[in-house]
Each structure stands twice: as C-alpha cells, then as structure tokens.
Image (cartoon, coloured by chain):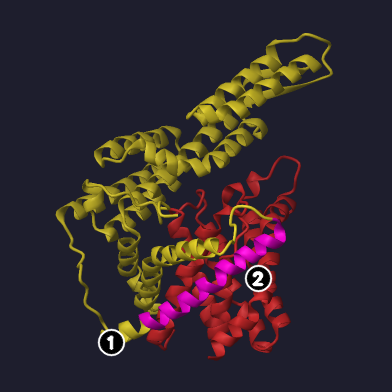
C-alpha cells in the first residue's frame, strides 16, 4: 500500500466491519455448529464494501474482518496456528474478491448475485482447505478428511450463501439507489 | 441484547491488567513458541502447573477460564477419544471388552437419555457426562443378560494414552493463555498494542497505522451499531414484526426489515464520522498524538525476561534431553 486511504474510506471501512460484526451478533438465532461454523449473513457488509469501493478495498476489509472475528472469539485457533491464515485472514479476505465480479456489470442484480456466490465459494474453499490440511485428524474414522471437510463446511456455507444471495437480490435496488446518491 | 459482551474483557485489577499490551502480546507469542516446542510430558505438566499458579496470582477466576474453554470441549473430547481409540503404537496397557446384547444396549440407551434430559437440572454438564459415559461403559462391559449379538474391544495403547494426554494439555494451555490475554485486555488496548508490535511491517509497505485505525473504529462502533439494531428491532416489533417465530418466508422478511435500516444507519454514521475526523484535523498518513500513552514499567521488563527465559529453556530441553 504505497498510497494512503482517504479519511472517508477509512471511516467507511471501519464502520462496515463493525456492521459485519454486529450482524454476526444480531443474527445469533440462526443455527450454528460446533467448531465455529454457523449460517451467517456477516459477509454482506464485506460484499457491499467490495461493490462500492472496488475489489481491493473489499479484500482489505475482508481480511481485517477476519482478524476482528478472531479477536472477538478470543484468539482461539484450536491449537493450529496456520488456521489464522486459512480460516480467518484468507477466508474472509478472498470473499472481498467478489468485487472483481461486481465490476463486470455494476447495474445488474444477477451479476451481483453471482459475485456473492463467488465470494462465498472462495471463503468456503479456504475453510475446506483448512479442514483437509490442518484439521484432517478430527475427521471421524472411516471418513476421508476431504469428504468430511466438504460436508462440514458445506453444511453451513451453502445455506449462508443462499440466504445472502436472496437478501442481496432483494435489496440490490435500494443499495444502488443509495450508492448513486 | 444489552448484556452481550464484545470480546472477553472482564474488568479487574492485578498485575496482568497493569501490564503493557505490547508486552502481553510479545510474551504470549514467546510462550506459544515454548508450548509448541515442548515434547516431554513432564515439561508439559510443569507448564500446566505454572499456569495454575499464574491464575490466582493474576486474580483471574478459574471459572472464567473454564467458560473460555467450553466451546472447545467438543474438540478436546474428540481428540482425546480419537487418540485413545485409534493410536495402536507402543505397549498395550489395558483392554475393555464390550458385549452387546439387546438388554444392556437398551439400558445404556436409557442412561444416555436420562443424562440428556437430566443435564438441564445440573450445572455440571461435563462432569455428569463423564459419569454417564462411565456408567454406560460399565453396563456394556460387565452386565450381560442375554446372548450377545456382537462385541467390541477397546484397546488402550501406551502411545495413544500419551498423545491423548499430551495434545489435551497443549490445547488447554494455549487456550488458557489466550483467554488470559483477552480477559485482561480491552480490545482497544489490544489493537493499540498490535499496532506497535507490528510496526516493523512498515518495511514491507504495510501501513499498520491505517489498519489499526480501521480496526479501532470498527471495535468502537460495534456496541453503537448493536444499540441501533436493538432500537430497530423494537421499532419493527411495534409495527408488528415478530422476530421470534415465523416460517422461512417470514424469516426473510424479518431479516430484510432489520438489515436495510442497519445499512442505512451505518452509511450515515460513517459519513458523520469522516466529517468529525476531518474537523479534528485527521490527515491520513500523518503522525498522530494519543490521549492515553503506553508506558513501559519495570514489571513489563520482568515479564518479558521471564517469558524469554521460559522459551529458551523449553528449546534447550528439547535439544539437550
């Protein structure tokens, strides 16, 4: 980062990340799994950040949100330090890469939806990799780690992605009205 | 929603609270390295004993740390059982022959059901789980009423037991250490400490100040936005939105009715915040002064030296033993 961010951008990123964390708390009523997996809408502010400010800011914001997430959960890496990168920084950071898709056609809600899908998929893929590479030993006997990780992470990421795509499409017009203003 | 704690900070006063956040972070890192380097069981037990002495010294109740460990219990049990059951290296220590017949299996099932429905009346869920588990194993191995239709032998090997205890201790120590950090340090102080500790990253063109500013803003605004969310929930509830019940379609409507105002409010908040920052002469990239300066005390030097010695000692033990 050779150039510095403007004050407006710093404030916007900061508040968006706070919103993402607040959404995580407010929507606690959505079902959750042990070991941290839960259906969550908290990536939506990251997607909106990527939509409004572009993919790079989206990636920066996502990475920082991953860090804040880790901070709020009390720095629990389950004894595997590499999980810091795969499960937090990279997983949430790459979700911001949805901005590359949004850029293709910012006015199209279906493109917005595909962007959300791509971002969620990248996050899922990082959790999946972490499951295979780092937490393989926790898979039940007889189940290959790859399959277990796929099922475990898919079981909350797929509904999350579906829910976010639904919500994203439903309020896309409002978002556009707000960012054009 | 008011009583949701952001992070794990619990107000208190002890030497752990008075330490500089920079030192806490560096000491935590050094101790993590030390714990990961240890490969002798007795050293690990020593480390655990050290932590058990540290907790009362730092006036942290063990109960609070236990609550920090609770989300991990599932993982701990899983690792433990996995190692015990499937690690077949080393000397065979003991075997437990389980016999299944219709009667004792259903008896075991009854015990499990009794535990499952009884656990809400006791505050010792984990302890009662262990008791129930022991009872089930006893029933399955000792009591036979009818002709058994199958059996399973649990064989515990030396290595399996060793690794189970070892990994368990390592996880408990690491989680306890990081819980101590988050219990005794406010997220904002932690952020400030991190900014200072990560300053060397400037060499590779990572702007740590900017990043710390963003994280600081975000930590500051989480409670504010939660308050706003609370207001919106009340406002929408007064218009008849029911946040407790509803089918899938109604749930989506509830979520939208909560999300849209939250977004609009946070967009407005961030505009206001940017204006307020500029009005106070915040210029991105320029050095800033602080209201609360971090001060380095003799205590900090002492803690730093102790953790450095511990790390070197554990590396030494590993190499020399």
- Residues drawn in magenta: B247-273
Can residue B321 be seen at all in this image of the molecule? no
Quarter holding the C terminus of chain B is: top left
Splitting the image into 4 quarters, where does residue B1 fall?
bottom left
Label 2 in the same subunit as label 1 = no
* A140 w.r.t. B125: above or below: below
Q: Check the rendered structure and report the hue given to chain A.
A: red
Q: Output the chain of dot 1.
A: B
x then y, percent, for residue A142: 76, 41
Assess disc 1: are there few (<14), some (14-19) or many (≥20) residues with their C-alpha within 10 Å of its C-alpha: few
Please tell me the colour of chain B.
yellow
- Assess disc 2: are there few (<14), some (14-19) or many (≥20) residues with their C-alpha within 10 Å of its C-alpha: many
Left or right of A62, for residue B31: left
The residue positioned farthest toward the front in the image shown: B239
Residue B50 in the image, given as x and y percentages of width and height: 32, 37
Please tell me which residue lies in front, B80 or B214: B214
Q: Is residue B277 above or below residue A73?
A: below
Q: Residue at x 59, y 47 (%)?
A: A34
**Label 2 sits on residue:** A167
Q: Residue at x 75, y 10 (%)?
A: B144
Under tag 2, what secondary structure? helix
Is residue B258 magenta-colored?
Answer: yes
Instruction: Give the total of numbered labels.
Output: 2
């Amino acid at each position: 980062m050779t150039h510095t961010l403007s004050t407006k951008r710093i404030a916007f990123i900061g508040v968006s990340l706070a919103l993402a964390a607040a959404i995580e708390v407010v929507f606690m009523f959505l079902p959750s799994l042990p070991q941290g997996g839960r259906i969550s809408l908290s990536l939506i502010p990251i997607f909106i950040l990527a939509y409004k400010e572009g993919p790079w800011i989206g990636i920066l914001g996502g990475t920082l949100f991953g860090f804040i997430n880790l901070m709020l959960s009390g720095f629990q890496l389950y004894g595997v330090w590499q999980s810091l990168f795969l499960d937090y920084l990279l997983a949430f950071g790459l979700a911001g890469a949805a901005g590359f898709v949004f850029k293709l056609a910012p006015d199209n809600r279906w493109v917005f939806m595909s962007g959300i899908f791509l971002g969620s998929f990248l996050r899922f893929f990082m959790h999946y990799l972490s499951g295979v590479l780092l937490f393989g030993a926790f898979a039940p006997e007889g189940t290959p780690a790859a399959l277990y990780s796929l099922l475990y992470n898919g079981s909350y990421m797929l509904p999350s992605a579906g829910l976010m795509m639904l919500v994203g499409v439903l309020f896309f017009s409002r978002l556009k009205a707000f960012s054009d203003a | 929603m008011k009583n949701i704690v952001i992070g794990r900070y619990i107000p208190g006063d002890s030497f752990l609270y008075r330490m500089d956040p920079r030192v806490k972070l560096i000491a935590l890192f050094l101790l993590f390295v030390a714990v990961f380097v240890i490969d002798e069981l007795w050293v690990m037990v020593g480390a655990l004993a050290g932590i058990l002495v540290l907790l009362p010294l730092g006036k942290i109740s063990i109960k609070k740390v236990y609550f920090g460990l609770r989300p991990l219990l599932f993982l701990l049990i899983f690792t433990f059982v996995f190692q015990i059951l499937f690690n077949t290296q080393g000397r065979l220590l003991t075997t437990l022959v389980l016999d299944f017949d219709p009667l004792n299996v259903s008896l075991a099932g009854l015990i499990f059901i009794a535990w499952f429905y009884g656990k809400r009346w006791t505050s010792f869920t984990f302890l009662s789980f262990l008791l129930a588990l022991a009872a089930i194993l006893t029933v399955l191995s000792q009591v036979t009423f009818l002709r058994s239709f199958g059996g399973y032998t649990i064989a515990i090997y030396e290595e399996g037991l060793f690794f189970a205890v070892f990994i368990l201790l390592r996880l408990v120590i690491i989680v306890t250490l990081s819980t101590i950090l988050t219990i005794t340090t406010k997220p904002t102080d932690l952020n400030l400490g991190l900014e200072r500790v990560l300053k060397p990253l400037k060499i590779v063109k990572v702007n740590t100040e900017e990043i710390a500013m963003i994280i600081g803003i975000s930590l500051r605004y989480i409670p504010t936005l939660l308050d706003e969310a609370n207001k919106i929930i009340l406002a929408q509830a007064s218009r008849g939105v029911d946040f407790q019940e509803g089918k899938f379609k109604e749930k989506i409507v509830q979520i939208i009715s909560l999300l849209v105002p939250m977004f609009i409010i946070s967009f407005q908040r961030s505009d206001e915040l940017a204006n307020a920052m500029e009005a106070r002469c915040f210029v991105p990239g320029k050095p800033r002064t602080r209201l609360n300066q971090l001060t380095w005390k003799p205590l900090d030097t002492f803690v730093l030296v102790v953790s450095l010695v511990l790390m070197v000692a554990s590396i030494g033990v590993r190499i020399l033993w």
